Image (cartoon, rainbow, N blue to C red):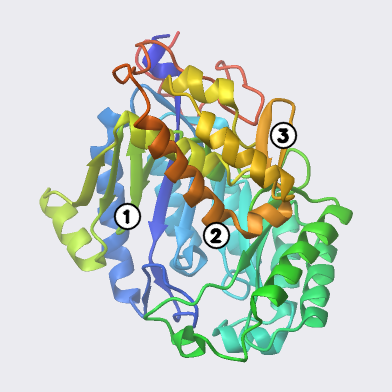
Amino acid sequence: MPESAEKRIGIYVHIPFCSSKCAYCNFYSLPGGDRLMPLYNAAMLKHIEEYEPQLDGYLIDTVYIGGGTPSYYGAGRLASIFNALKRYGHVRLDSEATVEVNPGSITKDELLKLRRAGFNRLSVGVQSADDKMLKSLGRSHSYADAEETVKNARQAGFENISVDIIFGLPSQGKDTWAETIAKIASLKAEHVSCYALKIEEGTEFNVFKDSPFLPDDDEQADMYLYAVEMLARFGYRQYEVSNFSRRGFESKHNMKYWLGYEYIGFGAGAHSYIGRCRYSFIEDVEKYIERVTLGQAVVEYSEEMSDFENAGEYLMLRLRTVQGISEGEYYDIYRLKMDLILDLMKKYESSGWMVFDEGRWRFTPKGFLLSNTLIGEILDAQARQRTQISKPWQTQQPGEEPQLTLFPKRPLEAGLFGRRKPSGYD
């Protein structure tokens, strides 16, 4: 088996369709675009087929279908996309295959279809256990719908379920937030994503910017720290600033982003990271369909990452995780020292924002609250450190592929969907 075939990759598929736009949503999505769904699916399948040469030599070990509302797109279309990835790529039988669903937008029969197609993980957009809050968010479901969706998913055979919740909502108090945490825990999902509300321009919720109805910074901080403490009591270990899981159920796909691993995106607005290149496709469903159908380029933005930029991303992304960063690891990969960064992190440690444990620096929950500011200061220190380097930039030598992972490496002999094998696979 050639070295190239041992490389693993994640696949992200963007489904931009939804029944209606949520009041807080700033993602690229297209409510009321049902007529375009068949055309979009045909273009998606064609695009995946065209990528067969790029996919050859990679083992696909994570697939994530997000949106929008993928469950609104229909189980049949989602299955056809996954089948295309199996046909034109090398999808491991033990891959983590996630699809996002909204309560009330998917039936038990559709969940069975998804499970039979090979999907083994669901991400359920619950957002709140308070029906009034859900209505204010523009959600079309109730909390009872969320309970029913999780129950149906279990009966369909899903043993890995994640739920999303949001704090810092207008008029949300600590008691309401505590009730949501308790009810979410009662769902017994394997994973919880807990996000702070972010007011974005262009969304309906922008009217709440600087509003007294929003919890202030101190109240939001209390909600976050309460969630960290209570989710831990319910058995959810924090492994990233906004993500918590039972042991062994961390999102392997999202960890690819935070660990700087390669991934390929398909669909309008999807992003990819291959080699040293980041690129994204055009954020326009109709243009995406037209250009893919005509065999025209759909890349809207691309950027070749420098060694120094990759080193900065190591700091920025890994500090989002509880694994944090290591001085030795940083030097081994990028041949850079971090003396000024260490000075800064020692100050954070004295403030209770960071800890040094088993040779790694990581944020505490209180540090995560300030992480955007603190990481910015760390990146500034990295830039100042660079100006002190007397030797030319040293790059990673060919063949040196660092093994950075939170998960045990599985044997490469694991089976693949379908009969195809990577070229040279014995």
Q: Residue 10, position in %: x, y?
A: 46, 38
Q: List the residue tagged with mark 2.
A: 100
Q: Nearer the viewer, mark 1 or mark 3?
A: 3
Q: Secondary structure at mark 2?
A: strand
Q: Residue 363, position in %: x, y?
A: 67, 46
Q: List the residue tagged with mark 3.
A: 356
CA–CA distance in space, label 1 to label 3: 41 Å
Look at label 3 and name its amino acid. Phe
CA–CA distance in space, label 1 to label 2: 15 Å
Q: Earlier in the sequence, mark 3 or mark 2?
A: 2
Task: Give neighbour class at mark 2: few <14, some 14-19, many 20+ (Cα, 10 Å).
Answer: many
Does 297 sit left or right of 377 as displayed? left
Q: Residue 381, position in %: x, y?
A: 46, 40
**Badge 3 vs badge 2, beta-carbon distance below 8 Å:** no
Which quarter of the rendering shows the N terminus? Answer: top left
Task: Give neighbour class at mark 1: few <14, some 14-19, many 20+ (Cα, 10 Å).
Answer: many
Which quarter of the rendering shows the C terminus? Answer: top left
Q: Nearer the viewer, residue 308 or 6?
A: 308
- Image quadrant in which you'd find residue 278: top left
Above/below status of 368 relative to 402: below
Q: Nearer the viewer, residue 44 or 185?
A: 185
